């Protein structure tokens, strides 16, 4: 999208577009269908319309599809996808941060589980409030940018909630996953941790070290709670807060993103904001913090169902991205 485009009037926006849709809750392999005639969303005054270039998948997408939080969800039919990277093709009347032609990225849903958008990022066009978006760092591809928002913002918000700061030690459970890869990097390179330990399976230990882990723990061979060393913070990205509590120092803190939670560990649900992406931009531009993409991807738009099937194995390293989106 050329930045020279002056107004939305000169960009032809279709009324319908291609998207992946589910009309009932269930497994992705059963309910997710390609639809070439999904209405392009109308934008509200605080929103922009994005021509999607890449989208990344998150566990929340398939959990939502399964109906795990249907009481607070918008009702189907639904186009899944929280993470987006693309170009602005139309701006609402009250938008001040972005103009047509800007390359942006973000997590579309400010409140992950509270009425997330019916039209997500697995479509040619999607709408988002300007406050959840940021300008894409120039050194990142659309694929790399799409991989970041939900995972890196979740990593950052969790560290903030436990008041992580320079000189503290941290253990990351699930260090090779979408969120864990960013907890390691942020703890080390942004928050200046004194020591970063992380768990993963045997083949992924080198990745943990390359991201900044001082101690890489093979969970297939040892139990992290049996280590003599204890940590100021344990960030649980796998759902083991009961075990995490045994690895924390007295007075330390455990934060988890997957329930059920064992007190005094705390659990939280991300509030998406472009402000975190803006804050982290210098680290992304300098390469101190890097996107981590699963080597099986990116998956073409036509293989979105296969991308979900792979994500659902819980074996992905970093993020699973769908690209190009037509």
Image (cartoon, rainbow, N blue to C red):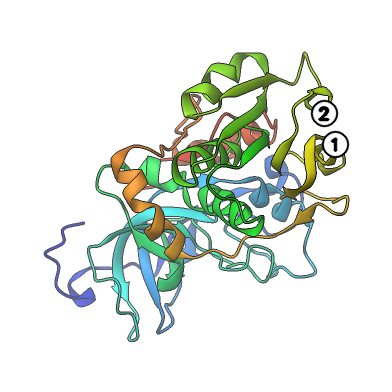
Query: Is residue 236 among what the camera can see?
Result: no
Q: Secondary structure at mark 2?
A: helix
Task: Report the residue marked by disc 1.
Answer: 246
Which is nearer the N-term, disc 1 or disc 2?
A: 2
Q: Between residue 234 and residue 102, name the one nearer to us.
A: 234
Query: Is residue 259 among what the camera can see?
Result: yes
Q: Between residue 175 and residue 74, name the one nearer to us.
A: 175
Residue 197 image point, x, y percent: 63, 29
Q: Is residue 217 above or below residue 318?
A: above
**Residue at horizontal 85 percent and vertical 54 percent from the top:** 264
Q: Is residue 241 above or below residue 11?
A: above
Task: Report the residue marked by disc 2.
Answer: 225
For label 2, the crowd category at 10 Å Cα-Cα, with few meaning under 14, some 14 to 19 and many 20 or more, is: some
Q: Secondary structure at mark 1?
A: helix
Q: Between residue 70 and residue 274, name the one nearer to us.
A: 274
**Residue at horizontal 54 percent and vertical 56 percent from the top:** 82
Q: Is residue 206 above or below residue 116?
A: above
C-beta proximity under 8 Å, tags 1 and 2: yes
Instruction: Give the quarter of the image for residue 171.
Output: top right
Q: CA distance from mark 1 to mark 2?
A: 6 Å
Q: Is residue 43 left or right of residue 222?
A: left
Residue 268 image point, x, y percent: 71, 59
Q: Is residue 196 above or below residue 221?
A: below
Residue 1 image point, x, y percent: 21, 56
**Residue at horizontal 49 percent and vertical 65 percent from the top:** 273
Q: Is residue 300 left or right of residue 263?
A: left
Q: Is residue 175 left or right of residue 257?
A: left
For label 1, the crowd category at 10 Å Cα-Cα, with few meaning under 14, some 14 to 19 and many 20 or more, is: some
Q: Is residue 243 left or right of residue 13?
A: right
For residue 209, the mark is: none
**Residue at horizontal 60 percent and vertical 46 percent from the top:** 58
Residue 161 image point, x, y percent: 65, 59
């Amino acid at each position: 999208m050329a930045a020279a485009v002056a107004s939305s009037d000169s960009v032809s926006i279709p009324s319908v577009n291609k998207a992946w849709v589910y009309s009932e809750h269930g497994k992705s392999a059963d309910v997710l269908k390609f639809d070439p005639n999904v209405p392009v969303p109308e934008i509200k005054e605080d929103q922009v319309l994005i021509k999607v270039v890449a989208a990344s998948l998150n566990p929340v997408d398939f959990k939502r599809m399964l109906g795990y939080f249907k009481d607070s969800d918008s009702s189907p039919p639904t186009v899944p996808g929280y993470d987006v990277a693309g170009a602005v093709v139309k701006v609402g009347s009250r938008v001040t941060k972005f103009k047509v032609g800007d390359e942006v990225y973000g997590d579309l849903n400010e409140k992950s589980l509270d009425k997330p958008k019916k039209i997500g990022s697995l479509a040619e066009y999607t709408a988002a409030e300007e406050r959840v978006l940021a300008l894409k760092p120039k050194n990142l591809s659309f694929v790399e940018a799409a991989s970041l928002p939900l995972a890196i913002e979740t990593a950052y918000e969790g560290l903030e909630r436990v008041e992580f700061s320079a000189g503290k030690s941290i253990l990351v459970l699930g260090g090779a996953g979408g969120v864990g890869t960013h907890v390691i990097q942020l703890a080390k390179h942004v928050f200046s941790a004194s020591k970063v330990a992380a768990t993963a399976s045997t083949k992924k230990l080198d990745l943990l070290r390359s991201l900044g882990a001082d101690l890489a723990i093979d969970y297939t061979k040892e139990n992290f709670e049996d280590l003599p060393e204890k940590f100021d913070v344990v960030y649980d990205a796998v759902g083991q807060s009961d075990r995490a509590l045994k690895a924390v120092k007295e007075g330390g803190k455990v934060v988890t993103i997957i329930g059920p939670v064992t007190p005094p560990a705390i659990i939280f649900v991300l509030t998406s904001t472009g402000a975190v992406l803006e804050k982290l931009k210098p680290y992304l531009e300098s390469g101190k913090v890097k996107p981590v993409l699963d080597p099986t991807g990116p998956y073409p738009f036509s293989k979105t169902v296969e991308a979900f099937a792979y994500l659902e194995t819980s074996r992905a390293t970093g993020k699973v991205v769908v690209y190009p989106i037509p």
